Image: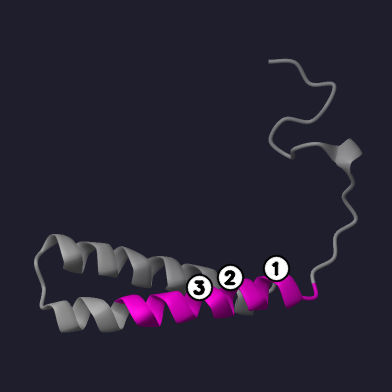
Amino acid sequence: MKNSAMFWVANTTITLVIVTIMAAMNFSFNWVFYVTVLGQSMVVYMVYKVLTDNYTTKKTFKDFYEDHPIGESN
């Protein structure tokens, strides 16, 4: 993925973690509600950006995982 898609993934994750912290710290309902709505809209946009990202790779399923290539033993 390009930086723009990863930017949205990171920001959405941070926003939703902030919502969780705000709810646990008993912030005002208005703040938690508005940040939750913002986070949900960010999730929708993030999914759109990831799915429409022009990402290509030369890897195939034969490449398996990069951290454990086929043929290597533990």
Q: Is residue 15 magenta?
A: no
Q: Residues within 10 Å of mark 2 (few under 14, many from 20)?
A: some
Alpha-carbon span between mark 3 and mark 2: 12 Å
Residue 22, numbered circle = none
Quadrant of the image occupied by residue 2: bottom right
Evaluate if marks 2 and 1 touch, with contact meaning CB atoms under 8 Å apart: yes
For the point 65% across and 77% down, which residue is it? 48
User: Which of marks 2 and 3 precedes in the sequence?
Assistant: 2
Identify the residue shown where x is 72% and y is 71%: 51
Q: Nearer the viewer, mark 3 or mark 2?
A: 3
Mark 1 against mark 3, which lies toward the viewer? 3
Give the Cα distance between marks 2 and 1: 7 Å
Q: Which residue is mark 2?
A: 6
Vertical placement of residue 3 versus 26, above or below:
below
* The C terminus: image quadrant: top right
Seen from the viewer's position, the closer of residues 26 and 2 is 26
Q: Is residue 65 visible?
A: yes
Q: Quadrant of residue 54?
A: bottom right
Please, what is the three-letter code of the amino acid marked with disc 2? Met
Q: Residue at x 9, y 67 (%)?
A: 26
Q: Secondary structure at mark 1?
A: loop
Which SS class for mark 3?
helix
Please give the range of residues in magenta: 36-54
Disc ID at residue 43: 3
Q: Which residue is denoted by mark 1 in the rendering?
A: 1
| Marked residue nearer the N-terminal end (1 or 3) | 1
Q: Is residue 51 on the magenta stretch? A: yes
